Image (spheres, rainbow, N blue to C red):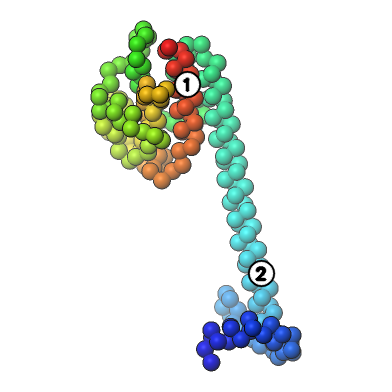
Amino acid sequence: MTPDAVVNFLKQHPEFFEDQAEFLATIMIPHPHGGRAIPISERQILTLRDKSKQLEDKLRELIVFGEENDAIGEKVHRLTLALVTARDVEAIIAALHFNLREDFAVPHIVLRLWPEGGTHPQLPEFGAVSAAARDFAESLANPYCSAHAMVDTAEWFGEAATHLRSFAYVALKNGRALGLLALASEDPQRFYPEMGTLYLKRLGEVAAAALAGCLA
């Protein structure tokens, strides 16, 4: 009789456990963690305990994730308030740099802007940007994370570029791309292709809306 046949028999005849209760009490099986043999009832209790521990660990993990998301959400909220209350482009740029550095601990932040028309402040953020970088920003539907600098953006980070090991790019769009926010770190695991980018996307949308209002 095969193990599968035994299993099928027990499924089809649940009364077996009730009819053979005394016999089942005499069955001894190996302890799941080695050592002595134990009654089948004790083995069932151990199984339930293991399952309970797994559920507790999963719940604890979910709680931690929830707390982390709450903390990130609070930081994004603070940055959003700073952006929407900024009175000019300089204040928006300052808010981006300050909050990303202080709240999110991003060590390297570069912003490049190329809005159409209007008079732009004489700031590094409005410096020349290659067609390749503009096309890259235009192609982004979502933030993009990579272990390498994209197109010619490495030079934006100056002398630090050779030490950077992870990058995140957020296109700032108001219909069309009006800028590109580039974040970088010496830590290879800070930004990686598989990471979630929901908060980066929201950041880009708020920043683009604030900038578009000031540059119109």
Amino acid type shown at disc 1: Ala
Q: Residue at x 37, y 9 (%)?
A: 118
5 to 100, vertically: above or below: below
Q: Residue at x 58, y 87 (%)?
A: 6
User: How far across and down, in percent of the image, does residue 86 sit?
Assistant: 52, 14
Instruction: Give the distance between the C-alpha atoms of the residues marked 2 and 1, in whole angstroms.
Output: 54 Å
The quarter in which the C terminus is drawn is top left
Res 193 visible: yes
Labels 2 & 1 near each other (Cβ < 8 A):
no
Q: Classify residue 41 as left or right of residue 146.
A: right
Q: Furthest-front residue in view?
A: 175
Q: Classify residue 140 as left or right of residue 85.
A: left
Quadrant position of residue 72: top right
Q: What kind of element bears circle 2?
A: helix
User: Would you call the spot at circle 2 few (<14 residues within 10 Å), some (14-19), or many (20 or more)?
Assistant: few
Q: Furthest-top residue in view?
A: 119
Front residue of 215 and 36 = 215
166 to 171, vertically: above or below: below
Q: Residue at x 60, y 43 (%)?
A: 66
Would you name the residue on which mark 2 appears? 48
Quadrant position of residue 69: top right
Would you name the residue on which mark 1 appears? 209
Amino acid type shown at disc 2: Leu
Front residue of 149 and 178 = 178
User: How far across and down, in percent of the image, does residue 59 sit?
Assistant: 63, 53
Sequence order check, earlier mark of 2 and 1? 2
